[in-house]
Image (tube, rainbow, N blue to C red):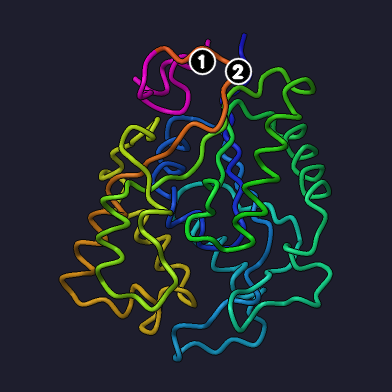
Amino acid sequence: MPDQPSLLAVFAHPDDEAFSSGGTLAHYARQGVRITLACATRGEAGKITDPSLTVEDLGRFREAELQAACQALGIPDAVFLDYHDSGRQERVRTNDPRALMNVDPFEVEGRLLELIGQVRPQVMLTFDPHGGYGHIDHLVIHRAASAAFFSGGHRYSGLRRLFFTALPVAFTRRFAETGMPMDYEPERYGVSDETLAVSLNVSALAEHKLAALRAHGTQTGPSSRMGQLSHEERERHQRDLVHRESFSLGGSRAAVPSYPLRGFFDGLSGFEHLDT
């Protein structure tokens, strides 16, 4: 008999999971898949985008936000890897030895291999090779999680597939048109439709994903990028972001029955029912 279906999602900061794959995590949790969300840091170098919040310790505050988001998605509390947020731009923490960008990536890979041994996933999920929008912590986690998938193959025979978060280039172009104040290159960070191995309609779980996003109040407040959008732009952005989630295939040790796949477990022996 196959093991219980298990999915390990690996991200860098609280809120990464909700934006990129909240609907998908909620979907598979409802299918009986054991979801493990690993978060490398507590996002302590982030901005506070809601001035009405009183925050004394941003890391602890964002940890609580993430657990509230997990509750909204119907998945277990996240597992923290206990590294520090490296920050971005003027907030870069160059001198912090525990900032993720300063940690030996082989150490992070080893920590993930330990976690893989504990939760025995058939499927892993992490950032794409550009880290969504180039954040250094996202790039480190992409590298470490990808490495753990490849080095984990001879340790854990059940580890079958690796997926990356992915945004169609049509979406990244529309996002760039909003004129958001960030160093965003839509042609670099978006992918062609042919790159998408899985595209899930998660409209039925839209309210759960929106609730998870709202749980990250320090990051989704009125001065956030989302908060600065016009009503029309926000409506369009939410349609793009909330109702469909897409992924590319990072690696597979199982046959791919068709392309694109119907879902993460499509064609994995014993788990075909999860994607019917």
Which is in the foreground here, disc 1 or disc 2? 2
Question: Which residue lies under the disc numbered 1?
Answer: 268
Q: Quadrant of residue 113?
A: top right
Q: Residue flagged by tag 2: what amino acid is it? A: Arg
Q: Quadrant of residue 64?
A: bottom right
Q: Quadrant of the N terminus?
A: top right
Q: Which mark is residue 209?
A: none
Q: Quadrant of residue 91?
A: bottom right
Q: Is residue 202 above or below residue 48?
A: above
Residue lying at 54% horizontally and 81% vertically, measured from the top left: 47
Give whichever of 114, 207 is nearer the camera.
114
Q: Residue flagged by tag 1: what amino acid is it? A: Leu
Which residue range is magenta in the image? 258-276
Residue 95 is inside the magenta segment:
no
Residue lying at 31% horizontally and 55% vertically, measured from the top left: 241
Q: Is residue 5 above or below residue 39?
A: above
Question: Which residue lies under the disc numbered 2?
Answer: 253
Q: Position of residue 88 (x, y in %)?
A: 59, 74
